[in-house]
Image (cartoon, coloured by chain):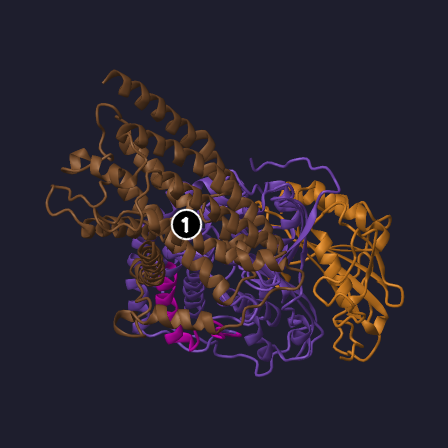
Amino acid sequence: MSGPIHIQPGETFTLNVGPQHPATHGVLRVKMEMDGEYIVKAETVLGYIHRMHELMGENRTYPQVLPNLSRLDYLGALGYTHGHVLVIERAAGIEVPERAEYIRAITVELNRIASHLFWFGAFVMDLGGFTPLMYAIEDREYILDILEAVTGSRLTYCYYRFGGLYNDVDDDFISATRAFIPRMRKQLKKYDALVTGNIIFRKRLDGIGIIPAEMCRKYGATGPVSRGAGIDFDVRKNEPYSVYSEFDFDTPVYHECDSLARYKVRMDEMEQSLRIIEQGLDKLPDGPIMPKKKPKLIKPPKGDYYQAVETARGSFGIRLVSDGSKNAYRFKLRSPTYSNMSLFDEACEGMLIMDALAMMGSLDLVIPEIDR
Amino acid sequence: MSLTIFNALVAVVAAIAFAALNAAYLVWAERRGAGRIQRRPGPNVNGPLGLLQPPADGLKLMAKQLTIPGGADKALFVVAPVLAMVPAIMSFVTIPFSDTIVAHSMNIGVLMLFAFASLGGLAILFAGWGSRNKYGVMASVRAVSQSISYEIPMLITVITIVMITGTMNLKDMVAAQAGGFWNWNFFPSFSSPLMPISFLLFFVCTLAETNRAPFDLGEAESELVAGFHTEYGSMGFGLFFMGEYANIVIGTSLMTILFLGGWNCPFGLYPGVWWFLIKVYLLIFSFIWIRWTFPRTTIYGLLNLSWKILIPISLFNLLLTAGLLKVF
Amino acid sequence: MTMTNESVKQALRDLFPDPVPVVDEPASEDAEEKEETRTNGVLERDHAAYGYDIDVQLDPGELLAAVMIVDKAGFFLESITGVDWIKNDQLEAVYDFSRYDFDTCRIVIRTRTPRSTPKIPTISKVYPGAGWHERETHDFFGIKFDGHPHLVPLLLPEDADFHPLLKDFKP
């Protein structure tokens, strides 16, 4: 029923999904050419929350830009600030103490779970099930509390500094995180029983919303979208940064290419993140959290640097073109959802609107991150 | 003559009062129930246990301005919410709550109920079409195909019951199930061994007929914004809302009458209206429970379920019952 | 670097008639002067220091050929962006390609075009995903992508006639 169909031209109408629509979770607009319930052609319209972070990156000094990065993606903010500090450290050649690297990995993974939890709730809500959202938010609250205690904020973190961290974690953080891990494992089993096994849920996702691997490649889709298409790609593994090469974790890959595969990838990723956090806490070394000698004014030498990190949504890249001054000459943000969303127009052709919107939910969109 | 008119007036007023009260407090029950299921308190600020929430909501809705969107078909737009509510209230007239509490007992009560139930689909079509909103039109088309598909298996199941009890009068149907729970139509008998399946089928059809989750495709908020009542605010929306809950009460009442022995006690003790209400509210609770547990189906999944599964089963059940009635 | 990547590098090198020696731009600290630009050709970069492995600079005319080589080798498009080299009166378009498998290799392709008539052929025929990236680069820098099917503003308003990332942009 969900396969592409052939439609006679001239009998269509235009449907504006968005910019204010419950399924887009933000100000995204998709202009759909509809034939009844079928989508003939779709065109995504962006820019409703465009803030030109790239220009702000050029006319501010490097530390001044730091808080901007967490405004890109309000659900997985730490991953984005991590990318920023890494590219500056790479360019300016700043050494990071090991303890800081471990704490970064632990907090990023906590944030990744929080982001996936919120996605899980919102995705099931897209399918009409409201209750899992409440459960997911309750679990996410634990993570936000843990992170709030060390970083000082709940959503738009500015915790990392060039060379280290803003402050060290305390015993409360470690004990709270340790207590969270078994709780989350139990909850994941519950979600599995409540949602993954639900017949209606499976029927809505199984074999629907196909995004094949070749399409992922042509559009540059990364993260759970490409992993759901059978591509074993995770920046943490393929291009290890920080201390990720020290951890033993798997990259969940599913080959079905459908919405259910992308759902399963994210659910499995939470479990893998828990493993990383567990190992990080076990291995957490003592020591300083900021390097002993660090330049007062950060002026990376002239050059063109790139850093990719795996955020909750995929491969986030920063291209930094430095002219040796205290501002960036060019500050390009390659946001993962931008590429993931760009394939939607092609992928949803010939689909029913409700399947297409379920597929859109499975892409895990965060609109401020697409528009930047 | 004047006495009959007076009687009829009292009956209608009582029916409206019952429907409105139920609609208001089912919303409260739904929200409290959803709260329990989702581990949050639900409305608990206005009055004890939040019991004053429904009047507050009602006042808010009534105080709001009724806007008619430009380009809308005014007549249809205004008629639709009324058409959603009136048949629901009229249906209450013929439902027997107990041996004595029934506004007007008719010999073709079942037929009348279904006639009014079909009008509900018309209200949704009017609302969607009249508001000239693409989401509304899509939703109303969905809702109409849904109500047509689900009325068929529902009616076939009712025909089975009519064949067993030999009457179309709802009161007589309940009387035929008196005695104890083993006499209820819910349990299989020699002449109709598939009755529990019929009940399940009827239950699913009622969910679909009342546009309840997981079959709430007419107001699927994640794709069609608010479906057929996207453009409605104020009491127009309020009437749709009340109509939905009134329809739930009717659907569950019908289930109670047809399958669960109406006002009869399971053990033959103290039959009365309380048994009827207990059964109805238990069924309503299960509706709420289902709504907050399951995600929504797809439109094609819904139609497939009806045409490929429910209709063949109900037809088979009808033929089997007819054959067995001839034998026994 | 693995076999695939070596062969890609060789194929890219073959695009240039006079491949050696490729001169990197000098690391001058004097920002006032007109900057020396590097010559066209393929450079190898240290991944740990720069974050990418192969750095190609070419003329806009050779872009499609290079992108086809990269496409054939199974790279995915990471991003497209621009840089405004106002002192040289040039706009640079930067294309990033990376791999899904474990032969980690990021290829950067750069091409420069005059600031007054910025024109670069589109690669959206090879990589449909380039459509959005090129529209964004057109928004920010005003680079015209020749042959792009739908070159209208994506992130900026529909009627935007300014290019905010140009260095002489005044808001």
Left or right of residue A84, residue A157 in this image = left
User: What residue sits 47% from the left and 39% below the top?
Assistant: B302
* Shown colour of chain B: brown
B238 relative to A222, above or below: below
B264 relative to B234, above or below: above
- Of B251 and C58, nearer the camera is B251
The verdict on residue B246 being magenta is no
- Of A35 and B183, nearer the camera is B183
Image: magenta residue range: A136-162
Q: Position of residue A60 (x, y in %)?
A: 65, 80
B106 relative to A275, above or below: above
* Marked residue chain, label 1: B
- Which residue extends farthest top? B327
* Shown colour of chain C: orange
Left or right of residue A16, residue B107 in this image = left
The chain painted purple is A
Quadrant the N terminus of chain B occupies? bottom left
- Of B118 and C65, nearer the camera is B118
Name which residue type carries label 1: Arg
User: What residue sits 24% from the left and 34% below the top?
Assistant: B185
Question: Dot 1 corresponds to which residue?
Answer: B212
Q: How many marks?
A: 1
Residue A265 appears in the figure:
yes
